[in-house]
Amino acid sequence: MRAVVGYLKWLSEHRVGAASGLAVGAILVSLGLLWGLSWNAPMYSSAPETLFSIGPLASGESVEQEFEVAGSFLTGVEFFARADGVVDSSTPFVARLREGETIVREGRIETGVGAEIEAIRWDFGVLADPEGRRFRLQVVVDEGATRSIYLMASLTDKLPGSAVTNGIPAAPHVDLALQPWRKIRRMDVLAATAGSLPAGFTGLTVLVLAVGLGMGYLIFAMARDPVGSGVVPWVGLGLSIAVLVLVVEAQRSAGLSLPERHFRLWPGFFRTVGLLTVAMIGTIAAGPARRVTGSVRKEFWDALDGRRERSLAALVLVAVLASLVAGLAYALDGPEIVFVEVAGSSGEQVVQGAVGLLGHEPARIMSRAAAVIWLVVGAVALLFRVSARQRGSG
């Protein structure tokens, strides 16, 4: 405890040095997180149904399917297969990725396929800008396959066109079940993040600078350090915190589909920055507010006549605070959770919808508590009034 007290005293006496040290620490943590940063997830938010199959396919036979992606950095495609009998450890496939008539990527895959449906991912050299382009995946059962193979199909009709087996198109609603995939690291993750903003890296730089400078100013005001040469470390601390929050949110989004375009990366970034900003503004306002409330409390409290009025005033204050907390809980509350039944999932219910910072129960509890306290305030006020009348009539 003595060491902690001594450290806090040192910080209060060396604020600029503390700001510089914290900024360097935040940058080092950000660099460490960035070094291990990796996004490895499908590019579609929902997995395809694999309830039906195309086949049997013998050596040399193929299935093709067109698809598009909405994000950057396509690095692979996943498809699904099965075969009759036990797992064969050397089932060969040839996969080709075409854009129009041009073969963009080509590769050979050997994997085990058995009676259970297997997800087979074909990784290839990164395509940095696949958005807006239409690709066609061709999967060929290569020579050397000892059994007939079945490729899984989906009937949800989410992909353009339909599955084409040996040059013969299937019905329009039948698609080859596939998942475009993205596996990127470090600077590619930052490039994907910047690509979701206007002006790319320029927009990302402007955003981080704006957030960082604003936080640096608030930290400077909160520390109440005299204006001078010590301003720069506080600005550096704000910038380092903004960078750290961005990298942490990118880490938290690693397993999600296109987090830079969906509802995780940027809402999480602004929510964290917003909470930090509110905390700093509250700290800055605490001093003047304490002086004002102390003055008001003294004048108001001294004006109250007797224990009853002071007790009622205290109950009203508690009721107001409970109402404010209930309102904050509802502001942080998520929307109602909707359960949907998925076809073919044996009646299993799947949660659909976003969930906020708090569940529904805290908001309900606080609203009920506030209502009860207000009822108590009303009852006590009524009792005081009845009692005062009785004393007056007596």
Image (cartoon, helix red, strand yellow):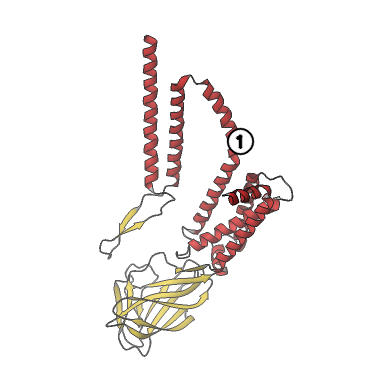
Name the residue at 52% across, 62% down.
250
104 w.r.t. 42: above or below: below
Residue type pointed to by label 1 = Pro
Look at the image and tell me in which quarter the C terminus lies: top left
How many residues crowd mark 1 within 10 Å: few (<14), some (14–19), many (20+)?
few
Residue closest to the far bottom: 144
Name the residue at 40% across, 43% down.
363
Q: Which residue is mark 1?
A: 288
- The reply to whether residue 106 is in sight is yes
Q: Is residue 371 left or right of residue 1?
A: left
Observer-nearest of 356 and 55 = 356
**Residue 129 spot, x, y in % from top left:** 53, 71
Q: Quadrant of residue 351?
A: bottom left
Residue closest to the far top: 394
Name the residue at 55% across, 52% down.
273
**Residue 280 spot, x, y in % from top left:** 58, 46
**Residue 127 spot, x, y in % from top left:** 52, 74
Q: Quadrant of residue 203?
A: bottom right
Q: Is residue 109 left or right of residue 294?
A: left
Observer-nearest of 372 and 265 = 372
Number of numbered callouts drawn? 1
Observer-nearest of 65 and 128 = 128
Observer-nearest of 109 and 8 = 8
50 w.r.t. 245: above or below: below
Residue closest to the far front: 2
125 w.r.t. 204: above or below: below
62 w.r.t. 4: above or below: below
Residue closest to the far left: 346
**Numbered disc 1: secondary structure:** helix
**Residue 11 spot, x, y in % from top left:** 64, 50
- The reply to whether residue 235 is in sight is no
